[in-house]
Image (spheres, rainbow, N blue to C red):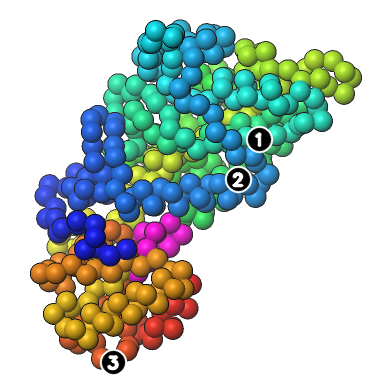
Amino acid sequence: MKLSQTGLGTVKLNNVDEMYPGQSILIQTGQLVQYGAGLFGYNTIPLLVRRNIEKIIVETLNKYGCAEVLLPTLQPDSLWKNSGRYEHYVEDGTMLITKTNKGDFCLAPTGEEAVVEFAKEKLKSYKNLPVTYYQIGEKFRNEIRTRGYLLRGKAFPMLDAYSFDADEEGMEKSYENIRKAFIEIFEIIGMKVIPIVADNGAMGGKKSEEFMLISDQGEDKILYDETTGIGLNTEILEKENYQEYLKEEYGIEDISNFKEIRTMELGHIFQLGTRYSEMMDGKFINQDNKESLYYMGCYGIGVSRTLAALYEQCLIIDEKWGACGFSLPKAVAPYLLQIIPKMDNEEKVKQAKELYELLNKNGIGAILDDRENLTIGSKMKDCKILGTPYMVVLGDKTQGNQLEVENTRTGEKQILSGEELIEKLR
């Protein structure tokens, strides 16, 4: 990508939000555009980061044997009335309704109803089971209290997956399969999450876990044992039989070593049992040639929430200026290197263009800052604003074909040839 073609200009950061500095920087630099409370547009770089997160999710779930589908976000209200959840979602103001002369439609806040309707047409026999369907798509919830920019919006991309099994034992195996997949997804992205014991709440079912990122920006408080790495949502303690529940479902007998910490929820998984198949008449023919209800699991990752948490995690903090940009992990950074030549030096401009073409030829994403009338210092600041992990400055001090490569996270510098640089980035 050439920056001269993007219309990007330097922006001086003012009054960066102390609670959410990363997203405040994205807003001030035009990488996110806010249309209203909880409604955002994405500029090129964060959009590509989001797509890389989605790519990691898709590749991992495919590896774990899941099948990708796409269900409609706009759904007839009859679907929700059939399940009995229409009144609940409308009364609490969560669901957005569209009234037309052809009937009333809902913008789906979640996908259980739609996926059971989808499965009924495909999974008619025990021979078709088990199956886990997943999709990544927009969800809509009329959040009264939007908070933290992308962390709690009215419209947001989400990974939602649903497993269908013939019995409880199969459901538990599918649940563990997706649990492992989720842990792997966050490890690849570069985020250390803690699966914690959680309350199923309004979703119903037997068992659930939330995937929490330790963060002072989070709105959740959990109890966490640093020695074992086990955590649990404090809501669990409100159950009358919580001690029995923890021992039976999770093998936790003593919570005296658990300490309270603040966290941010990025994902949630549930064992639903037959609740939704009962509501939606989701049945298959079992081995005894009789009708039987699906045993289901439900699994979600907030994609935009994960993106927002990642930007907050990858902040670069300058001793003088405070939060001034990002250094994104290589797994999700759309461009690994930013090339910054001195534009009034023809030799350096030529060298920069040759390096840019060499990187593109080798399939390595790079940004060429070919903007005129800007100082190298300003361009280096912009490199951090865009989150590029490495930068090469081609100024008067660089000699020959040697490249000084700087890690934008650590400030560490290396002198490399073009071939060595490609090997490093590859």
Q: Which mark is residue 61?
A: 2
Q: Position of residue 226 (x, y in %)?
A: 49, 48
Q: Quadrant of residue 94?
A: top left
Q: Alpha-carbon distance for marks 2 and 1?
A: 9 Å
Q: Which residue is mark 1?
A: 132
Q: Is residue 85 above or below residue 382?
A: above
- Foreground disc of the pair 1, 3: 3
- Residue matched to label 3: 400
Who comes first in sequence, dot 2 or dot 1? 2
Q: Secondary structure at mark 2?
A: helix
Q: Amino acid at mark 2?
A: Leu
Label 1: state its secondary structure.
Answer: strand
Nearest to N terminus: mark 1 or mark 3:
1
- Looking at the picture, how far across and down is residue 279, in whole percent? 62, 12
- Residue farthest along the bottom direction in this orientation: 400
Look at label 3 and name its amino acid: Gly
Instruction: Look at the numbered discs 1 and 3 and tell me whether their residues touch, using CB distance below 8 Å.
Output: no
Which residue occupies 44% across, 9% down? 102
Going by the numbered disc 1, the residue's amino acid type is Thr
Range of magenta residues: 327-337
Residue sitting at 43 percent across and 63 percent down?
330
Tell me how far mark 2 sits from mark 3, CA to CA: 47 Å
Q: Check residue 330 for magenta coloring.
A: yes
Decide if residue 349 is on the left or right side of residue 136. left
CB of mark 2 within 8 Å of CB of mark 1? yes
Q: Nearer the viewer, residue 170 or 375?
A: 375
